[in-house]
Amino acid sequence: MKFFIDTANLDQIREANELGILDGVTTNPSLMAKEGITGHDNVLNHYKAICNIVNGDVSAEVISTDFKGMVEEGERLAGLHPNIVVKVPMIVDGVKAISHFTQKGIRTNCTLVFSSGQAILAAKAGATYLSPFIGRLDDSSWDGIELIQQIAEIYSIQGYETQILAASVRNALHIVKSAQAGADVVTCPLSAIMGLFKHPLTDIGLAQFLADHKKANG
Ligand code: E4P
């Protein structure tokens, strides 16, 4: 399973990249706004800055909601760097745009996915990645991990090549459960990645090893 970080914060992207386990980055308009990245040129330059840190796919989301606008925007984004993946919302014009990008060899990430029906549409259109939002489903008492399992089963039976990118991840357990459910990629905040390190027995064991070494060696 590939690890992406879900942020537009350059320091956090650098920190995750330094762990040596990072395969890419996802952003969205809310994450860009959170970092104070506004204005057309600043947004494009920020995507380039992210691509210069990470050697992996970087999802850049279109703002347009009509086919023509999404195509213009997506082609501009894809031209920024070979690692840019155009992120397109799961709406009617979005599926048309994904289909267009597929034919042009431009890679896509279909976002705002909340059902297996939507997952089938995105795969049929040739999306490179599919982003089911597991945290937002859990927030509203649906089971996000169950959706990942169902999509993984459908994609396997049908032979769809679209990669399942578990998104809207809230914690380390979401990462583990996504891996178990068959996600190809997980995108998560740095806090969820760092949560994977935590186990009290590791800390207790290390303290004991160091204490024993000190006692024996002075
Ligand atoms: C990433 O591709 C999604 O935009 C993101 O994971 C959404 O996460 P959120 O539900 O925490 O906003």
Image (spheres, rainbow, N blue to C red):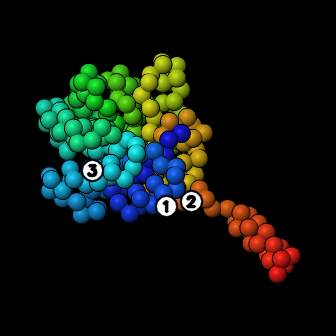
| First in residue order: circle 1 vs circle 3 | 3
**Can residue 200 be seen here?**
yes
Quarter of the image with the C terminus is: bottom right
Name which quarter of the figure residue 213 lies in.
Answer: bottom right
Number of the front mark, 1 or 3: 3
Say the numbered circle drawn on residue 191: 1
Number of the front mark, 3 or 2: 3
| Mark 2: amino acid | Gly
State the residue position of label 2. 195
Tell me the SS state at disc 2. helix
State the residue position of label 3. 47
Label 3 environment density (alpha carbons within 10 Å; few <14, some 14–19, many ≥20): many
Real-space Cα separation, disc 2 to disc 1, in angstroms: 6 Å
What residue is drawn where x is 29% and y is 54%?
49
| Mark 3: amino acid | Tyr
User: Cβ of disc 3 within 8 Å of ligand 1?
Assistant: no
**Is 76 placed left or right of 167 in the picture?**
left
Question: Looking at the image, is 33 positioned above or below residue 102?
Answer: below
